[in-house]
Image (tube, rainbow, N blue to C red):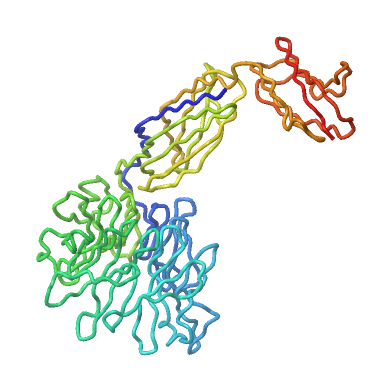
Amino acid sequence: MKRLLIIICFPIYLLAQSSPQIVDIGVGGISGVSKNGQYFCGSNYPAPPFLWSETTGRVELAPAGGEAYSVSNNGIVVGRFRDTSLIINGEPVLRAGYYTNNQWHAFEGMTGIPPLDPISFTHAYGINSEGSKAVGMVWHPDYNVEACYWSIPDTGIGLLGQTGNDDSRANAISNDGSIIAGWDGIQNGPGRRAFYWDPLPHFMGGFDPTYLVGECRGMNSNGSVIVGGSVWPFVWTETTGMQHVVADSSQYWDGQALGISDNGIIVGYVDVGQNNNRAFIKKSGWNDILFIEDFITDSLGITGYENWYFPFAQCISADGNRIGISAFPPAEPMHSLILTIDTTVPVELTSFTADADGQNVFLKWATASETNNSGFEVQKKFDDEKWEVLGFIPGRGTTSEQSEYSFQDEIHLSGIYSYRLKQIDFDGSYKFSNEISADVKTLVDFNLEQNYPNPFNPVTIIKFSLPETDNVSLIIYNTVGQKITELVNGKLDTGKYSYQWNASDVATGMFIYELRTSNFVSVKKMILLK
């Protein structure tokens, strides 16, 4: 007998909160954060670029003199590195590549076009979240550049064109790789105009109709919202077109929006005059930007940074919880800071179900969003016994996308089973889900099934089920009552069983098989036909 039980919980919030904090990861300029917020990268010329995670801390990506611009959810970095196998004028060429497994891997340039000089070959600026596609630019022999892309591993360069017959460059890419954003210049006009490719080129306009300058610098996960600068910071969608980020842009000389989260938080910088850049943040629903130093001190209550200079907020994670900032301590070179905001974005469990079928209970659950989620420990309790850990299912870190999970539990005894999830953060903190219960009666009676196949030659299968633990015998007789073989003789637990009889050494005929326990006897016939 099959019993189906489904329990749905809607929604359950497993709050994964963290206090606001700033982590100083050392000298250099931060440039990129993974969408899940677990990795940051940056450059510190002439020293090697770097990669940072909570697990590893800061790791230098040798050799020296390279650049790191963007990083995927699995820690693959794109940028440029000094390739000692490619020498021009006695110097290793600075070329585009991706860093993984403790080494750089080169991206190819255009076929038949070598580096023009040690620094003019290929550049990689963006990578999608899964680390399968990168974007950047490549140099032509006339010293013009063209927007391009590569797959990872590299299978050759793809060109995006020069719509204005001038330079072009790709800076950012959507999670699935279908949307690329950057700029495309035009001869006798702006050297940079805001463009995106899908893969066809699309001009996105500009704030000054007499000089439509601009460039794209970042986008949300699916590429539906793009940010950048057209003299002043902009945010763009297909529906609204290009919109000002700043309430009154005339207050500032210029600026750019450099990153946007999936919940609409924008970061970037504005020039308040005389190249005095000030990093800003603007949350969805705010009327205007707020300088990062004021946000840190007044909104978050973080102290110790009152005398720092904050020129750039470079990047933001998809959930808006982490921001990469380049800032100057008093009388020191630039430092890379990671700001973690207490946005109280939960691990939101939207469903938790149990589907009981025979000896198995199938658990399924889904989340609408996750923050710093290491994973789920699946726990079970039978009647009034203690909770038992069944297994661990890894989570997706930090994501605003829906995720689905499943787990199978094998049941041996009928009864009431309770299940819950222990959601564990990367820092070891945890929260429990609500409990769900399943009153599972997998087997309601003894049962001896007809053998299959029947007739058979020479092998057949005999199945039976037991509702309780007992001493069991399964014996095969001929029609005059002589025992031919004994397939089972011993104690068996509750459950379903299947046994094979190979009658290759027995003559054709009819046979009887008997299942016997202390409370049950069942007999059936079968035919061996050779």
Residue 232 % position (x, y)? 17, 67
Compared to residue 465, the image places residue 135 above or below, namely: below
Q: Residue at x 42, y 81 (%)?
A: 121
Q: Residue at x 50, y 35 (%)?
A: 377
- Residue 491 image-quadrant placement: top right
Compared to residue 440, the image places residue 113 above or below, namely: below
Compared to residue 296, the image places residue 69 above or below, namely: below
Nearer the observer, 202 or 503: 503
Q: 513 left or right of 422? A: right
Compared to residue 410, the image places residue 413 above or below, namely: above
- Residue 481 image-quadrant placement: top right
Nearer the observer, 470 or 341: 470
Nearer the observer, 119 or 335: 119
Q: Residue at x 44, y 73 (%)?
A: 80
Q: Quadrant of the N terminus?
A: top right
Residue 45 % position (x, y)? 40, 72
Count of marks, rendered view: 0
Nearer the observer, 152 or 466: 466
